[in-house]
Image: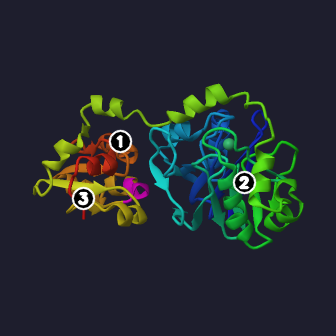
Amino acid sequence: MIFRQMFDSVSSTFSYLLASRRGGEALIIDPVIEKVDRYLQLVKELDLKLVKAVDTHMHADHVTGLGALRDRTQCITVMGEQSKVDVVSMRVAEGDKLQIDGLALDAIYTPGHTDDSYSFLMEDRVFTGDTLLIRGTGRTDFQNGDARAQYDSIFNKLLKLPEPTFVYPAHDYKGDTVSTIGEERAFNPRLQVKSLDEYVELMNNLHLPNPKMMDVAIPSNMRIGLAQDEVARTGLALSAEDAMRLVGREDVKFVDLRERTERAKQGSIPGAIHVAYTDLHESIGVGGVLRQLANSTRLVFYCAYGERSAMAVQAAHKAGLPAAVHLQGGIAAWAQAHGPLE
Ligand SMILES: [Fe+2]
């Protein structure tokens, strides 16, 4: 396995690059915008293909690198389903698997620092975001933070993991880099409380100043979505209503770009074929299944929110498949318009 912990010294943020092997798919957790060049250089040096960029929660202390990484690599952006950001490509919920070639991380919903905080468990290690820090815990006094929820997330979820599990947080301000669940249970001063109420009392009396970057970071992190309107202006987008009129037509094929788990959960458009976004380039290339289909049918790409399909339709046009369009707003817009699902 390839595992890199990277540090942004301005915001004291850790970002993590994971891949199962050289030459394989990679994902990055909690990237910082100022470091995007560095990440991409490392991805290239290790001969990796970045396919997912994940934020554990909406950050208040730095601008996320998710949007920039998506724009530069066409990777899938991922956050929790509770997140209020305008668009990410994919949302995860408690119990979902975050997968790339050769690796699977379990999404654990751990609200408290924010209401969209997730931790990700991968075998012997857990990425705890700002929920559990080394000898600390994330503040709970803004962004819908909730000390009670955080107590539950930490005591009833994270501390239930095996004691040797490595803890990799999103920040450290003291120079530590990694801990374990056992160590935090024993030595984290915030966790030496006797009750939920004692924890809430402790967290509600920290009186911390707001993070320096908060006024810049939050508004900008709210708007990380791909500019789907720009794609629509080039005539490559269909509204849900327009797309609904094409269901069942012989000369139209809907192409579902989501992952199997998303399809199972949200349902799919009747008659759609499945080509996961990560297999897109192969399938629109010479001899690929979509290239074959495009000779006789019009392709309508769709995904969860329209991000992957907007990138796919641009890639298809570049590859010489001019008849492809995409469903703006994805299955979310489709469901809102009461489009049929199976
Ligand atoms: Fe945070």
Residue 295, how many percent across, how many down? 17, 52
Earlier in the chain: of badge 1 and badge 2, it is 2
The residue wearing badge 2 is 4
Q: Is residue 80 above or below residue 180?
A: above
Relative to the observer, which residue lies in front, 288 or 88?
88
- Residue 107 included in the magenta stretch of the image: no
- At x 44% / y 47%, what residue is drawn? 89
* Residue position for label 1: 310
SS majority, magenta = helix
Are the residues tagged 1 and 2 within 8 Å (C-beta)?
no
Count residues near mark 3 (Cα–Cα under 10 Å), then give few for <14, some for 14-19, many for 20+: many
- The alpha-carbon separation of the residues under discs 3 and 1 comes to 17 Å
Instruction: Classify 57 as above or below 259.
Output: above
Left or right: 75 in relation to 140: left
Left/right of residue 67 with respect to residue 198 in the rendered view: left
Q: Position of residue 294 (x, y in %)?
A: 21, 52
Q: Is residue 282 left or right of residue 108?
A: left
The answer to which of 305 and 151 lies nearer the viewer is 151
Residue 265 figure quarter: bottom left
Mark 2: amino acid: Arg
Q: Amino acid at mark 3?
A: Ile
Q: Which residues are magenta?
A: 276-280
Q: In the rendered structure, which disc, 3 or 2, sits on the residue that comes first in sequence?
A: 2
Residue drawn at point x = 61 percent, y = 38 percent? 64
Identify which amino acid the numbered label 1 is placed on.
Ala
Q: Nearer the viewer, residue 241 or 8?
A: 241
Q: Which residue is mark 3?
A: 269
Q: Is residue 178 above or below residue 172?
A: below
Look at the image and tell me in which quarter the N terminus lies: bottom right
Whole-angstrom CA distance, mark 1 to mark 2, is 30 Å
Q: Position of residue 216 (x, y in %)?
A: 62, 26
Point out the quarter of the image occupied by ligand 1.
top right
